[in-house]
């Protein structure tokens, strides 16, 4: 199919096996344009959905994935995870004649190199924390000791969401550098580090559909990265999310002017060539400096971009898909074909709260082979699988983040109540979750 406007059923293959990919498959399956839907490799959730066919192929096997797509007349491939994007899966598949949703390797560098991403922000005057780049332990150690603002340590490459250390002291920062350089915790991803100023403020996630020319923002989310209640403990791949976010609505114009418009300008002038989903992690805070220069205000809040990702967020996707009123397939197709300007996006006027159910010792370890029992979920709640598999007819755990339960409600407070009520219907050994997802948002809503 060569048309830029989707007007008939198409076959889809979603590459990936996590909660994000299950949520995407679930939403695609509702499309009037959905033909056959494949998920490679998929998980227990996609396996039990009769509308989806799992394909036992790994996300790193570009040749076999491409062969399968061509042999089965797949009209569009949707790439979920970051690693295959960083390794050039889109370049590979497009050279084989496939239509792919996702950025090419060079465009995805906004995610797979934090140093490159920071330079892009500087070039386009997108607010970001002041920073330095170091390629060895000695230089990084020296910089931290000489700059008391240097308290955030990031492995430059992909590290499954666990390569960021937000430190409270010089000694913690030095320990982080030791873990990266001396212990080699992140392998090649840690051969270079970005050292940043620690910003104080509140975070939100903004996902942007981009077709190479046009930027279409999705509804904002807020992710909860830390493992334990009160934002304590190590960073994880994400322990929960909610949408919409009052913080975004309050600072919408500043975010549009200082984040979205510079991206649009970069597309226009050719300094950014991007098709797919661009995820901006934003912190709204009071600046001491902006892009290394002294701020002339210590009262106006600024939307700092903490990072870019080159794909759908996880668990943001699990929170957003039940809220999306529009048919998702025309949007994905338009991104791949460069016709996004002719599309519109609508959202249900309901809030969503997503709570991740993980192994008790996640992120240090995962769960495998524990039986999962799911009772009758209340209406308006959805269970997206991540680390699950079927064996002998039983649904079993197979990962660190096992499930993501999303519930809708007329308000964030009601959605949160519904989510935690629904969680009581799900059981597996050593199941754990945070009990405070969206709690701050609820408190803020109730205080106004």
Image: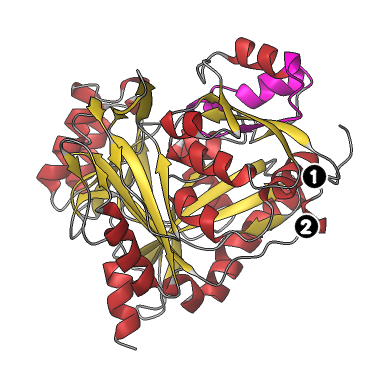
| Residue occupying image coordinates x 36% and y 72% | 414
Quarter of the image holding residue 270?
top right
| Residue occupying image coordinates x 51% and y 37% | 21
> Looking at the picture, does residue 218 appear above or below residue 49?
below
Residue 419 in percent (x, y) is at: 33, 60
78 part of magenta stretch: yes
- Out of 129 and 222, give the one closest to the viewer: 222
Characterize the local packing of mark 2: few (<14), some (14-19) or many (20 or more) Cα atoms within 10 angstroms. Answer: few
> Looking at the picture, does residue 346 appear above or below residue 319?
below
Compared across the picture, whether 145 is left or right of 11 comes to left
Is any part of residue 298 visible from this angle?
A: yes
Mark toward the start of the polypeptide (1 vs 2): 1
Question: Is the residue under label 2 in contact with that under label 1 (CB below 8 Å)?
Answer: no
- Out of 390 and 308, give the one closest to the viewer: 390
Residue 53 in percent (x, y) is at: 58, 26
State the residue position of label 1.
Answer: 338
Q: Which numbered tag is attached to residue 194?
A: none
Is any part of residue 212 visible from this angle?
A: no
State the residue position of label 2.
Answer: 343
Residue 312 in percent (x, y) is at: 53, 44
Point out the stretch of residues depicted in magenta: 70-97
Residue 402 in percent (x, y) is at: 31, 36
């Amino acid at each position: 199919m060569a048309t830029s406007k989707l007007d008939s059923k198409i076959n889809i293959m979603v590459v990936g096996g996590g909660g994000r990919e299950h949520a995407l498959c679930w939403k695609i399956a509702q499309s009037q344009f959905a033909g056959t839907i494949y998920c490679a490799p998929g998980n227990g959730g996609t396996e039990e959905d009769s509308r989806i066919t799992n394909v036992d192929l790994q996300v790193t096997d570009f040749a076999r994935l491409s062969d399968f797509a061509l042999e089965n007349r797949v009209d569009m491939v949707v790439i979920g995870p970051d690693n295959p994007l960083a390794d050039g899966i889109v370049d590979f598949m497009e050279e084989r004649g496939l239509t792919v949703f996702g950025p090419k390797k060079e465009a995805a560098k906004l995610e797979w190199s934090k140093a490159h991403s920071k330079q892009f922000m500087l070039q386009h005057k997108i607010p970001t924390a002041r920073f330095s780049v170091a390629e060895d332990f000695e230089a990084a150690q020296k910089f931290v000791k000489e700059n008391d603002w240097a308290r955030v340590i990031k492995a430059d490459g992909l590290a499954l969401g666990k390569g960021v250390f937000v430190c409270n002291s010089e000694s913690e920062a030095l320990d982080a550098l030791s873990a990266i350089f001396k212990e080699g915790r992140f392998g090649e991803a840690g051969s270079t580090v970005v050292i940043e100023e620690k910003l104080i403020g509140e975070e939100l996630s903004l996902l942007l559909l981009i077709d190479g020319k046009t930027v279409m923002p999705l509804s904002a989310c807020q992710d909860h990265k830390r493992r334990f209640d009160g934002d304590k403990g190590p960073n994880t791949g994400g322990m929960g999310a909610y949408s919409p976010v009052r913080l975004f609505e309050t600072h919408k114009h500043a975010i549009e002017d200082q984040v979205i418009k510079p991206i649009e300008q970069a597309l226009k002038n050719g300094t950014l060539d991007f098709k797919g989903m661009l995820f901006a992690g934003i912190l709204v805070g009071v600046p001491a400096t902006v892009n290394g220069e002294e701020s002339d205000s210590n009262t106006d809040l600024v939307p700092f971009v903490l990072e870019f990702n080159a794909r759908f967020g996880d668990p943001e996707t699990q929170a957003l898909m039940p809220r999306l009123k529009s048919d998702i397939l025309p949007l994905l197709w338009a991104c791949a074909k460069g016709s996004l300007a002719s599309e519109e996006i609508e959202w249900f006027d309901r809030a969503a709260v997503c709570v991740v159910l993980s192994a008790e010792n996640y992120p240090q370890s995962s769960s495998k082979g524990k039986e999962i029992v799911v009772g009758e979920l209340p209406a308006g709640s959805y269970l997206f699988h991540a680390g699950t598999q079927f064996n002998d007819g039983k649904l079993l755990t197979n990962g660190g983040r096992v499930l993501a339960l999303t519930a809708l409600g007329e308000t964030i407070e009601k959605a949160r109540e519904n989510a935690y009520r629904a969680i009581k219907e799900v059981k597996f050994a050593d199941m754990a979750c945070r009990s405070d997802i969206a709690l701050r948002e609820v408190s803020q809503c109730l205080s106004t």
